[in-house]
Amino acid sequence: MNRKANIRQVLLNAPYTLWAAIFVVVPLLFVAYYAFTDSGGNFTLENLSNLSRYANVFKKSLLYSVIATIITLFIAYPFAYFMSKRSANVQRVQMMLVMLPMWMNLLIRTYSWTLILERNGIINNFLELFGIEPLKLIGTPGAVILGMIYNYLPYMILPIYTVLSKIDVSILEAAEDLGCNSFNKFRRVVLPLSISGVVSGIVMVFVPSVSTFYISQKLGSESEWLIGDNIEYLIKSTTDGMNVAAALSLVLMIIILASMAIMNRFADSSDGGMIV
């Protein structure tokens, strides 16, 4: 009986296993192949040895992503917390407002910010009404980080809200019966129970932020290009750029996987949950 159940389970999982093999494993193998070969297909470590020239770009990508993730967390957690305390009708409206920007393509959402931040944009035109000189808002690190926060904020709100909305009210009532005031109830009950959602949100914001390329191109200058921008440039603009771009992608994947592993361990030790 157990053997039949195992066979049935294998057959049910077969389509998902095949899908993962084709669209996850195979592309990763191609990336690894190009990273360790030259334009002629010969094995080489030169692509990896040349990555030191991109060290500052990696540092900048990590720095911007960490800053954007932290700011997004500080914005998303209070919003998700108070949203989870509202009535069902209000929650539906607020959820629709959170998801509404996601109905538009990321390119459109990002490009709209150029119209707001540019020299003759909405903000500078408003400041000119008060005699304030136009500010350089676009083409700066702040503009790039702002674009990350705006585009990926829903990815932080949704997992936190999901966890908070599932906290049993009886647990909070028990904390009150034991003498917890509002602050202690949040610190001792709500925050620990929401850690899994926080960790999930951090991963969901950090991963696309560290690998982004369009946001930094539109809202930043060429000096603000991140690692994703360099990968795209190498693939499009140089004859042997595919191999160097693959090496950059391989290192970026290692960074992302390492970050996710750290977050998984943190979530596992705190809440017993896993992100991946």
Image (tube, rainbow, N blue to C red):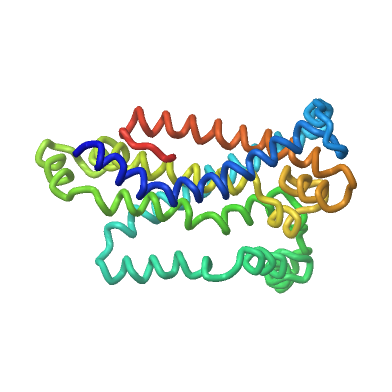
Q: Furthest-right residue in view? A: 239
Residue 256 position within the rendered picture, expressed as x and y whole percent measured from the top left: 58, 37
Along the viewing direction, whichever of 148 and 234 lies nearer the viewer: 234
| Left or right: where 138 falls relative to 253 | right
Q: Quadrant of the N terminus?
A: top left
260 over 162 or under it: above or below: above
Q: Quadrant of residue 274?
A: top left
Horizontally, residue 128 falls left or right of residue 261, namely right
**Identity of the residue drawn at 86% across and 39% down:** 39
Q: Position of residue 59 (x, y in %)?
A: 70, 34
Residue 189: horizontal and vertical position, in percent?
24, 39
**For this view, does 257 lie left or right of residue 250?**
left
Res. 135 image quadrant: bottom right
Q: Nearer the viewer, residue 103 or 79?
A: 103
Quadrant where the C terminus lies?
Answer: top left
At 84% from the left and 43% from the top, the residue drawn is: 241
